[in-house]
Amino acid sequence: MESWVPLMDIFLNDRTPETKASLWLQQSFGATATSSSSTSSPITAGSLIAMLTKPCNVTVDDSYSSPTTKTVMFIQTLPCFVQSRILSFLALENKLFSGHDLCRLARDVLGGGGDVGSDFWAKRAARNLLDVLSESNNERISGLSLDSEEQKVVEEFESLPGWIQDFVTNDDDLLLPWLPISPNELNSRKLFSSCENNSDQDSSSDLGENVEHEVSEIEIDCPVNVTLSSEIEELARDLRERIVNFESSSKTVGLANEIRRLCLDKGVDSFAVLGVIEPWKADDEMASVLISHLSNGSDEELSWPSQVLCSVVLPKLLVLEEPASRVLMSAMIEYCKIHQRAAVHALLFPLFLRKGGINNAVCEMITRIVRECLHPGHVSAVCQKVLSGAEAERKCICLPCHQSLISNELVWTESLFTLFQNILNHNVHLTQDSVDHIIYRVRELAERFSKSLKFGNFLLCLVNKCAPLLISHKVLLVEAVQHTNTIVTKSILSKLANF
């Protein structure tokens, strides 16, 4: 027993006993193996387990009864925190010991009780020891009945409630074994009569409103030419004349109110009305006032806000060649912050799919919307739909007269690569599908943009930001980069070599 005093001292006093105990045990094993003779008992793995499991008689002094003698293991006579440390050490170094001996020790610790034994933490360490040994010693620990208790809980959870079980056992003609309803009862109107209360009617009406809302959203994706009544068309033409003859901002506010009332309060097709009014022909100052005052004050996210954007702002941006004016940019950004879904469907998707491709001015516009109006996760979803989504997922909301300015596919330009670089620099995490599609296009377009520094900068940014998603594309990327000849080509190849 004296030879184990240093080890017990480590478990008792050291702050990190597992590491030092392991080192001491290895040194002691080596000293025992090289020693030719020793007066004390050899220090081995088996002797440690034998010492810990050695029976000891202890006296239990109970104030309510006379003292009694109880036989416990030596480890159970130690302070409980020392027991926990020893068991944690055995779990860490379990390969040095006999699995059978460790299981028996853990079982005995868990089986101990009464006034002498182990506390919660010691028993938790014993359970952890069993968990470590469970993969290779399932048969040895089956006597603990731990699995049986867990299985019992699972069976109880999956079993049918008693009131349903009675129906199942008494009636074989059921629609489903777990549903106590026969086919005749299911078809009966009486089954649902008790559910027809006011709250359910409200729920049904809410559901109907939601369905109508979704239908309206789908319908405005592809507006069609609608014939307006002569009265409505005359009012719309009058408003068009007033837009062209801009006078002052105060009068523009009143004009915005008249446009909103005509589109929303007369029960007419607002797309057709806006197509006659042609609000996109207003100058930038007037357009900024219209954007700010065409809101109807409701919580609507898509229908009317998207029509405002696609009739006032989008036509200007689709033909934009120079940077947009500051007044228009500010008004549009503030509007997009409030109506993010409308900004995606009525601005981002159409601009991404702009016929002829994105130029520098449009790239700057989209970059500002992405940075100031949308969450990075939202931007990632937009990129996925634009790059790899089905055509139905990226339907643009626009007036019929402007559909000819929008393509069905992305047109890859230098500015588009710059835009994706700006998006990546905004800490937007692209999905694997998006990255796969980009790599496919990069491989196709490498020769075309072989001397483009913007293309090279995008590739360098892509390698830096999306390295984990590019590992499977390393060969394709290397081939693509080797077709380029810019000042960043060597930098990209060196980074790819480290994948």
Image (cartoon, rainbow, N blue to C red):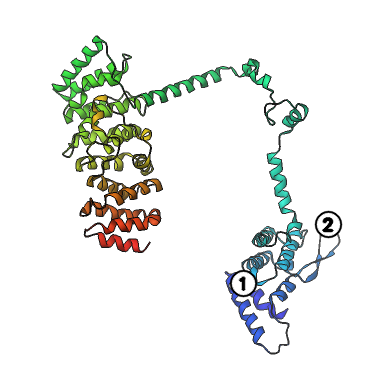
State the residue position of label 1.
13
Q: Badge 1: few (under 14), some or many (20 or more) residues near its Cα, within 10 Å?
A: few
Q: How many marks?
A: 2
Query: Horizontally, is 16 left or right of 423 in the view?
Result: right
Query: Horizontally, is 354 left or right of 112 in the view?
Result: left
Sequence-wise, which precedes: disc 1 or disc 2?
1
Residue 381 in sight here: yes
Query: Horizontally, is 476 left or right of 137 in the view?
Result: left
Q: Amino acid at mark 1?
A: Asn
Query: In the orientation shown, which residue stands out farthest toward the bottom?
Result: 36
Query: In the orientation shown, which residue stands out farthest toward the right?
Result: 66
Q: Amino acid at mark 2?
A: Tyr
Distance from disc 1 to disc 2, alpha carbons, whole Å, reads 35 Å
Residue 212 sits in quarter: top left
Residue at figure coordinates x 66%, y 74% from the top left? 8
Residue at figure coordinates x 38%, y 37% from the top left? 390
Residue 74: where, in percent of width, then height? 75, 70
State the residue position of label 2.
64
